[in-house]
C-alpha cells in the first residue's frame, strides 16, 4: 500500500507532466548594416576591380540606418535551458595601425565624401549628418562605404587615419566624425558649371575614364555616372524627367570648379564628332 510520501510524489509528477513544453526560438543570422556606395569619387588613381559587375559601383546609398548601428552584424543562437535568447560577444581582431600611405588614401576618400560638392548631392549621407544635432556620423557607417572598404575593413583603422584630417574631426569617444565647417548653402552656379555627356569615346564608362576625358577642360569637382536601372540621385530626377531621351543611356554628369571649364567641355563635342553629345546641365535638350 503506497505511503503518504509516495502519494505526494505521484501528485507532483502528475502536475509536472501537465505543464506545456516550450522550445527555444532560434533566429537566423542577419547583418545589421547593408549599404551600397554611390558611383561618385575623385579618387581617380584607384585601380579598377578585376571582378564584379558594374552595377556594384552604381546608385546611391540604399541603407536606412541610425548612428548607433554596428557593422559587425549579430548572430542570435539558441538559448540556454531557461529559454532565454543569448547573443555571443563579437571579438574584434587585434588592431594594427595603418601605414602613412594607407592613412592618406583613407583621409582623401572620406574627406571627399564630406566635401561641399559631394555632400550636397548625397542624400543618404546628408540625412545622417542632419540627423545628429552636432553633425556627427557613425564611423562604422562611413567604414561600410564601398570605396572605404576597398582600403580597409577595420573601422578602427579608419578612425586612426582620420586623426590626421584637417577637414574632419572625431568625437571624444572615437566613434563618430563630422565636418569642421558648417554645411554649405546651395550654390546657384552649380548648373552652369556642370555638363551632361553621352556616347563618350571611351571603351568603358567609369569615373576615372570620364575624368581623364574631360581633364584638359579644367579642374573637376565631381563626376557622377548614371546607368539605366540604377537609382537616380534626388537632385538629378527633375533634369532626367525633362530629358526623356536620356532614358536607357549611360551618361556622365561632370561638375567643374568654374563655368569656363564647362564651356570648354562643350567644345569637346566638336572635336569628337556627332556621336558624342555634351550639354550644360541647366538646359533641356535632346540626347538621342
Image (cartoon, rainbow, N blue to C red):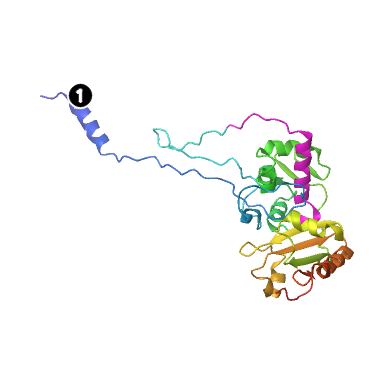
Give the mark count: 1
Q: Between residues 45 and 285, which one lies in front from this camera angle?
A: 45
Whether residue 246 is visible: yes
Q: Nearer the viewer, residue 120 or 137?
A: 120
Q: Residues within 10 Å of mark 1 (few under 14, many from 20)?
A: few
When the figure is inspected, residue 198 is found, relative to residue 97, above or below; the finding is: below
Residue 146 position in % (x across, y down)? 66, 48
Residue 228 placement: quadrant: bottom right
From the image, tell me which residue sits under label 1: 5
Does dot 1 land on a helix, a strand or a loop? helix
Find the magenta span and give its range. Answer: 91-118
Does residue 120 appear in the picture of this structure? no
Confirm whether the magenta stretch covers residue 20. Answer: no
Tell me if residue 208 comes above or below residue 150 in the rendering: below
Q: Quadrant of residue 151?
A: top right
**The C terminus, quarter of image:** bottom right
Q: Could you tell whether 229 is left or right of 255 in the image? A: left
Amino acid at each position: 500500500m503506497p505511503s503518504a510520501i509516495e502519494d505526494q510524489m505521484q501528485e507532483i509528477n502528475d502536475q509536472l507532466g501537465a505543464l506545456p513544453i516550450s522550445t527555444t526560438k532560434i533566429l537566423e543570422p542577419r547583418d545589421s548594416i547593408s549599404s551600397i556606395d554611390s558611383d561618385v569619387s575623385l579618387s581617380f588613381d584607384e585601380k579598377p576591380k578585376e571582378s564584379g559587375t558594374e552595377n556594384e559601383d552604381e546608385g546611391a546609398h540604399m541603407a536606412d540606418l541610425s548612428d548607433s548601428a554596428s557593422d559587425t552584424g549579430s548572430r542570435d543562437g539558441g538559448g540556454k535551458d531557461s529559454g532565454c535568447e543569448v547573443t555571443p560577444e563579437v571579438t574584434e581582431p587585434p588592431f594594427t595601425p595603418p601605414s602613412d600611405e594607407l592613412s592618406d588614401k583613407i583621409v582623401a576618400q572620406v574627406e571627399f565624401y564630406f566635401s561641399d560638392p559631394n555632400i550636397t548631392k548625397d542624400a543618404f549621407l546628408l540625412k545622417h549628418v542632419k540627423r545628429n544635432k552636432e553633425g556627427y556620423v557613425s564611423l562604422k557607417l562611413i567604414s561600410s562605404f564601398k570605396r572605404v572598404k576597398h582600403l580597409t575593413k577595420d573601422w578602427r583603422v579608419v578612425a586612426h587615419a582620420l586623426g590626421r584630417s584637417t577637414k574632419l574631426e572625431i568625437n571624444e569617444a572615437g566613434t563618430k566624425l563630422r565636418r569642421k565647417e558648417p554645411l554649405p548653402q546651395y550654390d546657384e552656379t552649380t548648373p552652369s558649371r556642370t555638363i551632361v555627356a553621352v556616347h563618350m569615346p571611351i571603351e568603358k564608362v567609369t569615373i576615372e575614364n570620364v575624368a581623364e576625358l574631360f581633364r584638359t577642360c579644367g579642374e573637376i569637382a565631381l563626376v557622377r555616372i548614371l546607368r539605366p536601372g540604377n537609382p537616380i540621385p534626388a537632385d538629378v530626377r527633375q533634369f532626367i524627367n525633362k530629358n526623356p531621351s536620356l532614358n536607357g543611356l549611360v551618361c556622365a554628369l561632370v561638375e567643374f570648379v568654374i563655368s569656363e571649364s564647362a564651356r570648354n567641355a562643350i567644345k569637346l563635342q566638336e572635336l569628337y564628332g556627332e556621336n558624342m553629345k555634351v550639354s550644360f546641365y541647366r538646359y533641356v535638350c535632346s540626347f538621342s
